[in-house]
Image: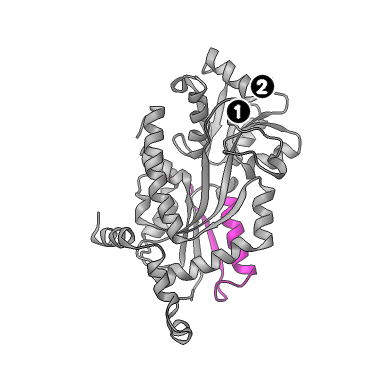
Amino acid sequence: MTPTAYDRRQWLGLMSAGSAIGLLGSLPPAALAQTAWKPTQTITYGIGVAPGGSVDLYARGIKNALETMQLINGQTVLTDNKPGAAGLMALQILQRNPGNAHFLGTFHTGSLAGQVTGILKADMREYVPVAMLVEETTLMAVRADSPLKSAKDLVDALKRNPAAYKIAVAPLRGLNTHLAIVKPLKAAGVDISKLTIAPFRSSGESMTALLGGHVDVVSATGPTVVPIAQAGKVRMLASAAAERGTGPLAQVQTWREQGVPVDYVSYNGVLLPAGSDAEQIRFWEQALRKVAASKDWISLVEKSGNKPIFKGYVDSYRYLQAELKATQALVAELKLETQ
């Protein structure tokens, strides 16, 4: 670990809830106006997946809101899709620009799962999770003409033959869409070590493969599945949320409702590079809070079948730490191989 990374983590660990940001809030308005950080150049937003799927959808939604709501001091946001290595290619944009808050990245539960399983060769604790804006529901879906009518149908078939159906996840095994389906299947008594798992670069590609008959089941988040389900092309069999959703998910039963007492929830937000200071964190937290409260953003998230939320830096950092521990326990329980 570099001294910079160590100092950063030590500061984060010692920081009481909101203290660093609170110090700025205690400054007189005139002093704050003179010292507060603002963007002065184009902002680069690294997206760790190919176009399509929820991570890409929300990153572009955030970009559009920041620009149209004029929250970034007249600057623009350049989105840069860098799929590969479980998101490492996009994270390297932040690694190359420590302390420069003109660079954003995607903060996602899948990255934490990737770190635990060893697929992502990075330590997410060395970045700054400035905000979480979406609580995601992972759905299990099949083609509309599939013989599978419920989660029980799939469980019963896989108990007889775990390799009977090809299951698509994205972008890799061991990430959130994979964990969100193997966790309930294992709890239901399926031998998950013998499943046929097919990884795709994005959930958009997973859905294309499902519609083309190349896979039988997809595990993906709401934005990818819901529009195709509403078009009548796929059937949503189960939600991994703790409670049944609203809107397009109001009729989709959770795994719990179908007799499998587990859930798996993902979160989506924004990262800053290591070394970002309190003023930079404060700026982005305030800007993203406004994005999260906007009608267009709320509509985008709700139409996708997910839940709009806002959790700032302190809560996001606490979630990062807690989720890493929870995922370590889950991976051990599922006996998944780590890289």
User: In terms of sequence position, does the residue under pointer 1 or pointer 2 come before the other?
Assistant: 2
Q: Which residue is mark 1?
A: 217
Return the x and y of residue 57 as percentages of the image width and height.
Answer: 60, 51
Return the x and y of residue 163 as percentages of the image width and height.
Answer: 52, 18
Disc nearest the viewer among 1 and 2: 2
Q: Is residue 268 above or below residue 228?
A: below
Q: Residue at x 40, y 68 (%)?
A: 100
Q: Nearer the viewer, residue 52 or 107?
A: 107
Q: Is 110 situated left or right of 156 in this image?
A: left
Which residues lie in the magenta part? Answer: 56-85
Query: Which colouring convention does the figure follow?
Result: one colour
In the rendered structure, are the residues bearing label 1 and label 2 in contact, judged by CB atoms less than 8 Å apart?
yes
The three-letter code of the residue at mark 2 reads: Leu
Mark number for residue 148? 2
Mark 2: secondary structure: loop
Q: Residue at x 74, y 39 (%)?
A: 230
User: Hey, which quadrant is residue 245 in on the image?
Assistant: top right
Q: Residue at x 25, y 54 (%)?
A: 1
The three-letter code of the residue at mark 1 reads: Val
